[in-house]
Image: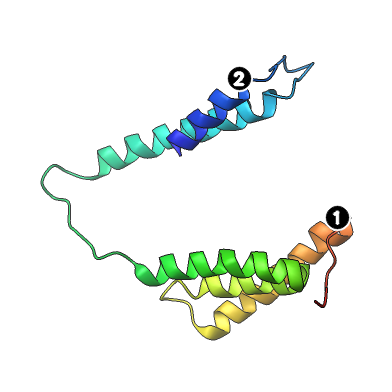
Amino acid sequence: MLLVGASAIYKGLDYQVGTLTRMGPGYFPVAVGSVLAAMGVLILLGARRQVPAGAAKRHAPEWRGWLCIILASIAFVVLGHYGGLVPATFGVVFIAALGDRQNSLRSALLLAVAMVAVSVIVFSWALQLQLPLFRWG
């Protein structure tokens, strides 16, 4: 997070930043990059404080979680392009929820249905984005 935030600040400074009352095109990337970098520093400091010296345990990588996150991202791109907002949202939430070993199929299904309802209300109704709810082909 620290590196991504620092790179956003670096690239944002290529544009005119401006002031709070007269924002330039570089203001938003610099502001978001600053917040992201600050959060990265806080996470780094918190992690250093919580682990006593010599007490760190090694855990095996959580391959199921990694695989589900990667597959959910791919599913969102494919389903968003060929299926629309509803199938893409359902797919990404359902697959990502299966990455947590404590989730059951039922809880992943309920979470996916709830997030589809929220995304339709927020993105289609409230924000009126031009992303179709369903697209065939």
Residue 105 locus on image (x, y percent): 53, 84
Q: Earlier in the sequence, mark 2 or mark 1?
A: 2
Name which residue type carries label 2. Answer: Leu
User: Which scheme is used to colour this image of the protein?
Assistant: rainbow
- Which residue is found at the position 56% from the left and 80% from the top? 107
Q: Residue furthest front?
A: 137
The amino acid on which the numbered mark 1 sits, given as a three-letter code, is Leu
Q: Is residue 83 above or below residue 41?
A: below
Q: CA distance from mark 2 to mark 1?
A: 30 Å
Residue at image x 51%, y 33%? 5
* Residue at which label 2 appears: 13
- How far from the left and from the top, in percent, is residue 135? 83, 73
Q: 10 Å neighbourhood of mark 2: few (<14), some, or many (≥20)?
A: some
Q: Which mark is residue 37?
A: none
Q: Nearer the viewer, residue 5 or 42?
A: 5
Q: Which residue is mark 1?
A: 129
Q: Pick the quarter of the image with the C terminus.
A: bottom right
**Percent x, y of residue 124:** 85, 61
Task: Point out the residue furthest to the bottom here.
Answer: 106
Helix, strand or loop for disc 1: loop
Where residue 19 sits, quadrant-wise, is top right
- Mark in front: 2 vs 1: 2
Toward which corner of the image does residue 26 lie, by quadrant? top right
Q: Is residue 105 left or right of residue 123?
A: left
Q: Is residue 26 above or below residue 87?
A: above
Q: Helix, strand or loop at disc 2?
A: loop
